[in-house]
């Protein structure tokens, strides 16, 4: 029998930071504007990675798209895209997480482009399989260049926040 006991240490500041970032990312879809919501959510993901690590950034990335669907920011026809949006958020978080210590901007741009490419590519396939041509065009628009713009703007917001709080590692 293994008598090894492990202790779980929870840092109060990290828990509070996680809850605040999760709250911001969860409330952002209530704004009901793709550019504002997307920028805020992406900023919270990047701030979470910088302050708490990739795991917490990934956890925060699971929630906003479901709330966006529930509040109407994401039209119901986009429900099949939610798993892909979550994976897109994970791509941003992981890419940024691995590259940000080399160069913040390399991490941001690489993660943003990869997230955009993934969402644009998968949405083109999924949407054309599931929707009429008219609906597909408007849905594809939401999953195209606005994803790149909101990721970059979110990165700029995160940079400003992290710089202002002196929590920015090498840039």
Image (tube, rainbow, N blue to C red):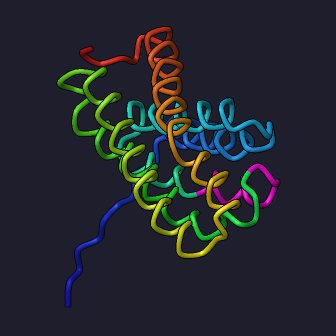
Above or below residue 146? Residue 74 is below
Question: Within the image, what quadrant is residue 93 found in?
Answer: top left
Does the segment drawn in magenta span residue 70?
Answer: yes
Q: Nearer the viewer, residue 164 or 5?
A: 164
Picture quarter with the C terminus: top left
Magenta range:
63-73
- Asked which quadrant contains residue 21, the reply is top right
Q: Position of residue 130 (x, y in %)?
A: 60, 75
Image x and y of residue 101, in percent: 22, 26
Classify 129 as above or below 26.
below
Image coordinates for residue 131, horizontal then vertical, percent: 64, 71
Residue 62 drawn above or below residue 170: below
Q: Name the one closer to the observer, 8 or 52.
A: 52
Where in the figure is residue 97, as x and y percent of width and height? 30, 39
User: Magenta region's main secondary structure?
Assistant: helix
In the displayed structure image, the side of residue 109 where residue 89 appears, left or right: right
- Using residue 17 as the reference point, say whether residue 75 is left or right of it: right
Residue at point 51%, 29% (across, down): 149
- Residue 82 in the magenta stretch? The answer is no
Corner quadrant of residue 107: top left
Q: What residue appears at the point 38 percent right and 53 percent down from the top-left corner?
A: 118
User: Residue at position x 51%, y 44% from top?
Assistant: 144
């Amino acid at each position: 029998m293994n008598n090894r006991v492990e202790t779980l240490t929870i840092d109060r500041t990290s828990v509070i930071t996680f809850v605040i970032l999760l709250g911001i990312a969860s409330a952002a879809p209530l704004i009901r504007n793709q550019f504002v919501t997307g920028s805020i959510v992406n900023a919270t993901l990047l701030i979470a990675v910088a302050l708490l690590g990739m795991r917490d950034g990934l956890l925060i990335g699971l929630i906003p798209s479901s709330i966006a669907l529930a509040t109407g920011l994401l039209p119901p026809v986009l429900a099949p895209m939610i798993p892909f949006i979550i994976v897109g958020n994970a791509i941003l978080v992981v890419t940024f997480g691995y590259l940000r210590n080399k160069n913040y901007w390399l991490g941001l741009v690489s993660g943003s482009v990869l997230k955009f490419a993934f969402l644009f590519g998968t949405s083109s396939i999924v949407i054309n399989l599931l929707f009429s041509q008219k609906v597909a065009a408007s849905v594809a628009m939401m999953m195209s260049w606005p994803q790149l713009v909101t990721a970059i703007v979110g990165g700029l917001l995160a940079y400003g926040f992290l710089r202002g709080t002196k929590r920015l590692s090498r840039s």
